[in-house]
Image (spheres, rainbow, N blue to C red):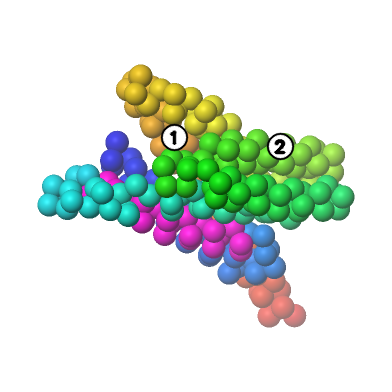
Amino acid sequence: MQDLRFLVFLLEGIAAFAGIYFYRNNPGNKAAGMFAYFLLITYVVEAIGFFPAMIYWNESIHFLKDGFFYKNFWLYNPYIILSFVVYLTFFRKNIRNKKTSDFLKKLIIIYAFACILFLVFTDVFFRTTSTFTYLTGSVLLLAVIFYYYFEILLSNRILNIKRDISFYISLGAVVHFLTTTPIFIYFNYFTNKSPEFIQLSSAVMIAMNIFMYSTYSFGFFFLSHKAIGKKKLAKDTNTGQ
């Protein structure tokens, strides 16, 4: 299982690199650029998140179990807020309906503010992962993605869907959050009652992360290749003239 977690970490790094590579070849896509640098932040956060495992598996540093880095809810709780804000903002920027886009902008601000207040006025911040942040964010994100799909189906954008990076990001995200959100709901209730459930849920979470970051990486690299091909063709055409 530890090897698979390292594979997820590796894929996160590849996805971040692929995203930045895509943005360099498509500098006009500011939403994709924002998402790419968010993936880089994710990679750094996950690198810090490995500290508890390092402490657990090395007896010589077991004294750090009572330290700041072992229980890192303080790191992941703000990160989860940032994560959903970035996802929601990314898809908001890919929605063409101005009224819906403006409404989502306000909704994102309200969501972020509510999550911060929840962390401030409860004991969750240092104790456990905020269920309120994750579940509310997941529901909002899935609703926004499905609206994005609905908007595409009613327009000619569907004809070029394979050339749109937002499609690949939506595919990875919707499968991931549709699968992991129910697990997250039940996870805290089964922690001490069913080790089998914990093992199964961990395996599913890892599988979904592998799928999601692989989808992101494929989309970024595939569309980068297309962009480079177009630039080369345009250059050859201009040279011929």
- In screen coordinates, is 74 left or right of 32? left
Q: Position of residue 68 (x, y in %)?
A: 32, 54
Q: Is residue 192 above or below residue 106?
A: above
Which mark sits nearer the N-terminus, 2 or 1?
2
Q: CA distance from mark 2 to mark 1?
A: 21 Å
Q: Magenta stretch?
A: 33-55
- In screen coordinates, is 48 left or right of 115? left
Res 189 seen here: yes
Q: Main secondary structure of the magenta part?
A: helix
- In screen coordinates, is 207 left or right of 82? left
Crowdedness of circle 1 by 10 Å Cα count: few (<14), some, many (20+)?
A: many
Q: Position of residue 4 (x, y in %)?
A: 33, 40
In the rendered image, the quadrant that contains the N terminus is top left
In the rendered image, the quadrant that contains the C terminus is bottom right
Q: Residue at x 26, y 49 (%)?
A: 66
Q: Residue at x 65, y 35 (%)?
A: 139
Q: Position of residue 23 (x, y in %)?
A: 59, 65
What residue is pinned by disc 2? 143
Q: Is residue 113 above or below residue 17?
A: above
- Count every numbered label the image shows and give the total: 2
Res 171 seen here: no
Q: Is residue 108 above or below residue 182?
A: below
What residue is pinned by disc 1? 205
- In screen coordinates, is 118 left or right of 150? left
Q: Give whichever of 198, 74 is nearer the camera.
A: 74
